[in-house]
Structures are given as C-alpha cells and as structure tokens.
Image (cartoon, grey):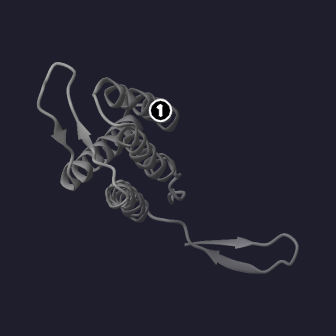
Amino acid sequence: MTTMTSPAVGHTYPVERASATTVTRTRRRRRARAVGVAVAASSLLYLGARALGTDFVLTDPGATEPHPLILPEIAVFALVFGLLGWGSLALLERLTRHARTVWSVLAGTVLVASFIPVFIERATVDTRIMLCLIHVAVAAALLPMLRHRAPTRAR
C-alpha cells in the first residue's frame, strides 16, 4: 500500500494498487464474461429469429442437401471464435506492445471475412440477415470487452 498526500489539503490517504495476481484475475474474468456474452447474444438472436420464422437452412452451392443450423452449432461457433479471440489477444500481449491495436485490426478482418460464407451459401434473405446480425453481435460482445485496459499493477 502506498500513502499519498493531497497537495490542496495536506491530508494523507492510502492508495491501493492492484497486484499482478489481481490484475490477471480481473482480466480473465472480464474476458470470460465477454465470451459468455457473445455466446448468449448469438443464442438469443438465433432463438428470437427462429420464433419469428427464420429457418436457418443453408445449402452449399455444390451440394443438393440443405443443412439446417441448430442452436448448439450457433453457440459452439460463438464460443470457439470467442476463445480464439481471447487466446490471440493474450498471445499478442506477450509478443508486442501494440497488442490491442493489432488485435482490433485482426478482429475486424475476421468479422468482415465471416460474412463471405453467408453470401456463398444458398439461404433465404432472412437467414442471411440473421446470420450477419449474429456475427456482428459476437463481435460487439468481444471487441470492447477484450480490449478493455487492465488496472495498473503495483511496482
């Protein structure tokens, strides 16, 4: 604990700085929460769209048999990409001082690239719109929460 003096009043008061362990735990909780929000948001959008009649049926251009997307697929994809985002940010933080910037550009690129299969597959307009909204919801959950700065560490 450090004691600081206020210049205007002359009083001293304790200032606690976060330990490295506290910073790591806080960061992990925040990032796990971001992944959870991404999974929940994509699942809720899927369920809401299904309730309104969206079929979520995709057909590969070269295939004849359609594939209906189900809730576990949506949730698992959101979870996998959330964990990949978390892992890539953690790796970048170890490799460069500009991890947040590099990760943001990488995340934006992945988001844009994720729209390509939506428009390659044969699907109804409402399915395509909802899949795009789900992709944006996952990105919206992950980008701000994974980029949040950690509290300052004690030195």
Q: Which residue is mark 1?
A: 108
| Towards the viewer: 29 or 55 | 55
Q: Quadrant of residue 14?
A: bottom right
Q: Quadrant of residue 64?
A: top left
Type of residue at label 1? Gly
| Towards the viewer: 133 or 68 | 68
Label 1, secondary structure: give it: helix
- Say above or below: 133 vs 35: above
Q: Tell me the quarter of the image containing the N terminus.
A: bottom right
Q: Quadrant of residue 68?
A: top left
- Say above or below: 100 vs 7: above
| Farthest-out residue, right | 8
User: Does residue 141 appear to the left or right of 84 in the view shown?
Assistant: right
| Towards the viewer: 52 or 43 | 52
Residue 13: x percent and y percent? 69, 79
- Say above or below: 80 vs 42: above
User: Does residue 122 appear to the left or right of 95 in the view shown?
Assistant: left
| Farthest-out residue, top | 62
Residue 75: x percent and y percent? 25, 53
Residue at screen point 31% across, 27% down: 117
| Towards the viewer: 116 or 37 | 116
User: Does residue 94 appear to the left or right of 147 in the view shown?
Assistant: left
Neighbor class of circle 1 (other Cα within 10 Å; few <14, some 14-19, many 20+) is some
Residue 105: x percent and y percent? 49, 30
Residue at screen point 33% across, 61% down: 51
Residue at screen point 21% across, 31% down: 59
